[in-house]
Amino acid sequence: MQEQEEGRNQEPDEAEDIITLSTGVVLDLLQPSPVLVDNLMRSFSAEEPQVPKVWITDKGRDEENPNDPQYLSDMEAWYADSGMRSIKALLPTGSRIRSKPDEMPGPEEPDFADLMETMGQELGKSRFSRYTQWVLLYATNPQDLALLGVKLLRRAGVREEDVREAQALFQGLQERIADSRTPGGGGGPHGDTVPSAPAGASVGG
């Protein structure tokens, strides 16, 4: 009996392999391709807005101006867009549905297609795009997305210091979606407003 108890205590921590979302949906977290993650990070780094420079007469040289309003706006959009693209890329091979509340239609059910039409969203053309759409527009809130993104990167074997840096991407996405919510608008399965994608980031695949 004691050996069985010790065995249970030595089992892997399930928290790294699953995520329970605020809607009651539980996802298994798999291991997305590290190559895919590396390609994503390289792409995001290449697209990161450059800090503008301003001429300082007293010093006789250019200096970076990270407080430039246009730069701050561009960085906000870059964070949100990169966060959305990361999650869209990692979701199809990095997660799957373990369980969901009975009252919630799954991504392949007719009621979900009807919901997307009601919301003015074009239904994804394949099961992977529909699954991604289901997670982004129906099964999560902004806080879920931020945590999901971080966990997917960890499952892909990304170094912890790189994960911490990437958290800014998901934080930017979380803030952009939260800001885009319309008070008193339509709700999700528990009365939550269904998040919209940031400008320029399609969620339908």
Image (cartoon, rainbow, N blue to C red):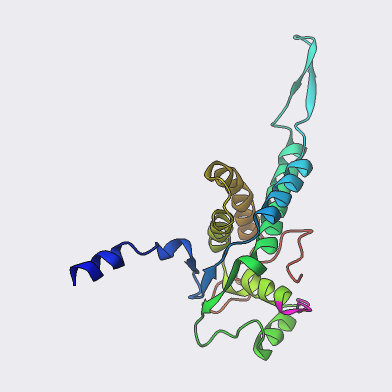
Quadrant position of the C terminus in the picture = bottom right
Q: Nearer the viewer, residue 200 or 6?
A: 6
Q: Nearer the viewer, residue 76 or 93?
A: 93
Question: Above or below — where is 100 with respect to 72?
Answer: below
Q: Nearer the viewer, residue 204 or 117?
A: 204
- Report x, y in % for residue 78: 73, 47
Quadrant position of the N terminus in the picture = bottom left
Q: Is residue 125 magenta?
A: yes
**Residue 194 seen in this snapshot:** no
- Report x, y in % for residue 195: 64, 67
Quadrant of res 164: top right
Quadrant of res 179: bottom right
- Report x, y in % for residue 198: 72, 59
- Residue drawn 75% across the image and 9% down it: 59
Q: Write down the region rendered in magenta.
A: 121-127
Question: Above or below — where is 67 with respect to 107?
Answer: above
Q: Residue furthest left?
A: 2
Q: Is residue 191 magenta?
A: no
- Residue drawn 46% across the image and 61% down it: 16
Left or right, 73 with respect to 140, comes to right
Question: Above or below — where is 14 with respect to 57?
Answer: below
Q: Residue furthest front?
A: 3
Question: Above or below — where is 105 with respect to 139?
Answer: below
Left or right, 81 with respect to 15, comes to right
Q: Nearer the viewer, residue 155 or 80?
A: 155
Quadrant of res 62: top right
- Report x, y in % for residue 128: 71, 74
Q: How many marks?
A: 0
- Residue drawn 74% across the image and 83% down it: 117
